[in-house]
Image (cartoon, rainbow, N blue to C red):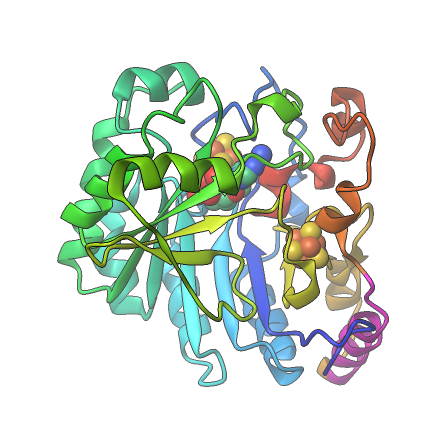
Amino acid sequence: MLDALQRPLGSLRISVTDRCNLRCRYCMPEDDYVWLPRTSILTFEEIARLSSVFASQGVRKVRLTGGEPLLRHDLPTLVGMLARDARIEDLSLTTNGLLLAKQAAVLRAAGLMRVTVSLDTLRPERMLAFAKSQRHADVLEGIAAVRASGFEKLKLNAVVIRGFNDDELADLIEFGRRHDAEVRFIEYMDVGGATRWSREQVVSQQEMLDTLTRRYGAIEPIAGHGAAPAERFRLPDGTTFGIIASVTAPFCRTCDRSRVTADGTWFLCLYAGTGVDLRERLRGGATDEELAALIRDTWQGRTDRGAEERLGVADRGALYRIDSLRADPHREMHTRGG
Ligand code: SAM
Ligand code: SF4
Ligand code: SF4
């Protein structure tokens, strides 16, 4: 099934909670937030049913995210329910890692296939300043636990911000090499929630490559990233890494991703102003066929190219002001899932 720009419905990110135990400056810089009402949060049964209907329409990859997904009570049970669906070929999780040490083995046993851990800095004092947490050691323990639990692949995500961690690119690559993990550098995006965003703080893909070339020598691009957001590269010694250049070289033309928030609102793009309320249909007694028809009709009309459209915005600044985020928390990255 293709959208209006011939892009398939291939991957679904499911946010299981809008709560988080970090306060990353690029995602949740404010002192307080408006949360989704608890009664609106989908149950595991509702999430599994939606996932199954999406799978019937072509979704093959599901990524659990949040907020911080490991804050959702009993997450391995949900993983087990989703893993039973043979149509889901790739079931993964994006986490900040704080609670991972205890849960990695159980999640693996439940059927989780891949884990991505967000690791922006190797310096605990920077994490304290930038994410208001002293628990850097817990993240490192979480990463070790993933490695010890038999996951085939581990990715480490780092949002690169000028003046914060742009001097750690090589250190992060070395850390990844030591832990058999592939590092992916992410350009700082002006998504909802990033109220402190400015163009000057964005370190572009080209700048990252220049820095790493000075350190390692010629870097070779690896061809063919398909619908994956990261472009991958190889250092002269064979080490690979990725860059997600959503700001300077967006990849909307191949985007097969959409997102369901913890309260069942379906967004066709990270930048989309509005979403489709699937919870209302689900709780209102819609059949699987009716849900599938809604998903099909909506996807076939999809024309979203949010990041590409942002390229044309003169005087680009934060996408939403705080009052508008408070008026509708669905606009927040931590609600929508990264
Ligand atoms: N809490 C989990 C975590 O941090 O991994 C999962 C949710 S988080 C919203 C998912 C991803 O979005 C993370 O890798 C995070 O770094 C990324 N992210 C959040 N805000 C961002 C921004 N302004 N620009 C680029 N990436 C961002
Ligand atoms: Fe940081 Fe993820 Fe929490 Fe956002 S949701 S504040 S990126 S840990
Ligand atoms: Fe996909 Fe929207 Fe991101 Fe473009 S901005 S890659 S269309 S989610």
* Viewer-side residue, 106 vs 126: 126
Q: Position of residue 204 (x, y in %)?
A: 54, 37
* Viewer-side residue, 42 vs 52: 52
Residue 156: within the magenta?
no
Q: Residue at x 83, y 73 (%)?
A: 4
Q: Residue at x 26, y 51 (%)?
A: 103
Tell me where residue 128 sits by quadrant.
top left
Horizontal side of residue 225 vs 296, given as left or right: left
Q: Residue at x 41, y 38 (%)?
A: 210
Residue 301: within the magenta?
yes
Horizontal side of residue 198 vs 142, given as left or right: right
Q: Residue at x 48, y 78 (%)?
A: 88
Q: Position of residue 278 (x, y in %)?
A: 75, 62
Residue interval drawn in magenta: 289-303
Q: Position of residue 289 (x, y in %)?
A: 76, 85
Assign the magenta stretch its main secondary structure.
Answer: helix
